[in-house]
Image: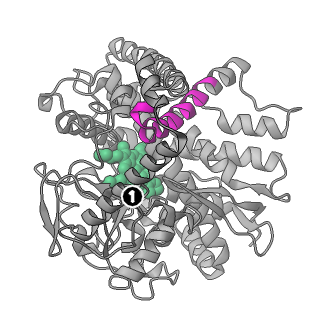
Amino acid sequence: MSTIIEILSLFSFRDVVNVFCIISILYVIKFYILYFTRTNSLPGPFPLPLVGNLFQILLFAGDISKWALHCQEKYGDVWETYIGTAKIVWLARADLIEKLMNSSRNSNYFHRTWENHGYEMLGFSSSGIVFNRNKTTWAFNRKMFAQAVGSSIFTDPVIEWIQTVFVEMERYLLDLGFDEKEFNFAEWAPRLFTDMLFSMTMDKYACTMAMLYNSHNPLKLAPYPEEIVAESDAFVKALHTHFRSLKYFRFTPEIIRKKTPFGRKKAKEYLDNLVWLRSVLINIIQEKKKKIMNTDEPVKLKPDLMTLLAAVNTPKDMTKKLESIVEPPLTDEEIGNCFMDITTAGIDSSSNLICSIIYCIIIHPEVKKRLRAELDTVLGTDPTRLISYEDLNKLEYTKAVIQEVSRLHPVTPFTSRLPDKDDVIGGYPIKGGELIFVSIIGIQVNPKHWPDPKEFNPDRFLKQSGSMKNEFPMFGGGLRICPGRHLAMTEMKIIIAMIFRKFDPELATPDTKPKYKYEALIRCHELMLRFKKRIE
Ligand code: HEM
């Protein structure tokens, strides 16, 4: 150390500045030599050294989806951008993503992004679904998840769970006078989906709506025992800390996480939180396993997702015939990671989409009228009648409305793929290891696929014939297509039906608009409404 200080003392401040300037100039020269001599160049915005094109996103207030649409308009359906020195190829046309959205197990496009040491530390790189980079364990976990979510023993009670949780929200809203007073629906939506997900995955109360209600009405608390509320509160808070930790581990360079006191402290806090969360989950899973072991009639157990996953591939499997069981059961850790994947991927996307759907229906009275007519025809005029699975299949216009809102306002505007090896896409050479962004929003408003793409017209989904999977990739596609898509559509249909058959939500003021923020997905953080009761 003292030798370094002695050497440094031989230089004046001016010398240090000069050396810094020379190194910077050499770096800039090298950056642009590489940029201008790059092979397989594509059109795209001009990058700056070190930051690449990141600074241009600031011109769009950090909203990458608006920036991507701007780039598409300027450069066409294929363009390139840079994060630092890393090139990213963008694709915004259905035929261009065909290879990426191929479901073959040998696909060149299994990985969604680069390897991340942070996720490895968290234990998600080879377990669970969303961040799993190991094809074998990913395929196994995903197959078990799809088997449980898709089994009829799960899908039937899910419809009841969703309705029960919605009725609870309805009670709180009416109790708080939100049929007359304006309130921020965007505050309630994530709680509605959290509570729903907790009941369908674990048969437990998350009580997040109850807590919001209590914060508005401390004199008349929601009817849950205090210890249940406190227990759920601790668990939900830990889950939120876990969501923040995913961002931290993804974006904070390893050197900061490991070598700086602040970085180390933060990483430890997050890891301790995850250890606690996992231990709670494992206790819950083991309780479920005990119940399964102690019964001769597993079909009589409450078929929440965790119970189904805990029994999968055991002699008490409720999702398939025993003679077809050849694989091992899921470990407790795998079940816990699947639960965290479901909450990570399933709460925010659904709750943000529901805000956009309600807003679009309100501002299109003719759409609301047709939607209501369909609800009344299929469900009848008694708003307390339980909705059944058969009813849902008949709600074609409602489904078209949900799809049209998702087309114009996708909550997940992009997904990505990392090719394992070199390829050619639409005539453009692509290098292995070069990240590809699929602009879901760009494809869904591309005039080559959608006439009058900016017009809100649910009928276009009723008229669609043939396959349009790559023209409407709201749930991604191929190997890594969203495995929760059917559940998500079920949730949306039921909630829209429950709202609009009984209520007539109105905007707080005629010019009220939802406020969105881009945070990996498009998050609605304000939608001021009144939940007026339906009169006609
Ligand atoms: C409206 C609601 C939802 C939307 C718009 C949505 C959209 C998406 C998209 C675009 C992807 C990436 C697909 C790809 O890269 O090709 C994805 C992945 C995923 N989604 Fe969803 N999703 C929704 C709801 C849900 C729900 C309710 C669940 C769980 C119950 C879920 C679980 C997952 C999982 C586990 C993945 C990762 C799949 C993998 O990596 O293999 N999603 N979702």
Indicate whether 252 appears above or below 47: above
Q: Is residue 79 above or below residue 493?
A: below
Q: Residue furthest right?
A: 219
Residue 164 is situated, as x and y percent measured from the top left of the image, at 60, 42
Q: Amino acid at mark 1?
A: Ile
Asked whether residue 458 is in view, the answer is yes
Q: Is residue 304 visible?
A: no
Q: Is residue 103 left or right of residue 500?
A: left
Q: Residue at x 17, y 35 (%)?
A: 136
Q: Which residue sits furthest bottom?
A: 452
Question: Callout 1 environment at 10 Å: few (<14), some (14 to 19), or many (20+)?
Answer: few
- Give the main secondary structure of the magenta stretch: helix
**Where on the picture, by quarter, is residue 235?**
top right
511 lies left or right of 355: right
Along the line of sight, which residue is nearer the eye, 43 or 494? 43
- Closer to us: 375 or 3: 3
Q: The C terminus lies in which quarter of the figure?
A: bottom right
Residue placed under numbered mark 1 in the picture: 25
In the rendered structure, the answer to whether residue 518 lies left or right of residue 153 reads: right
**x 65%, y 32%: residue:** 207
Count how many numbered circles sit on residues in the image: 1
Instruction: Say which of 500 and 80 sits in front.
Output: 80
| Element carrying mark 1 | helix
Residue 115 on the magenta segment: no
Label 1 near ligand 1 (CB < 8 Å): no
Relative height, residue 263 to residue 490 (above, below):
above
- Identify the residue at horizontal 45%, vertical 23% (top origin): 6
**Figure coloring:** one colour
Answer whether residue 237 is magenta in the image.
Answer: yes
Q: Report x, y in % for residue 217.
A: 85, 38
Which region is colored magenta? 234-256
Tell me residue 220's x, y (percent): 86, 33
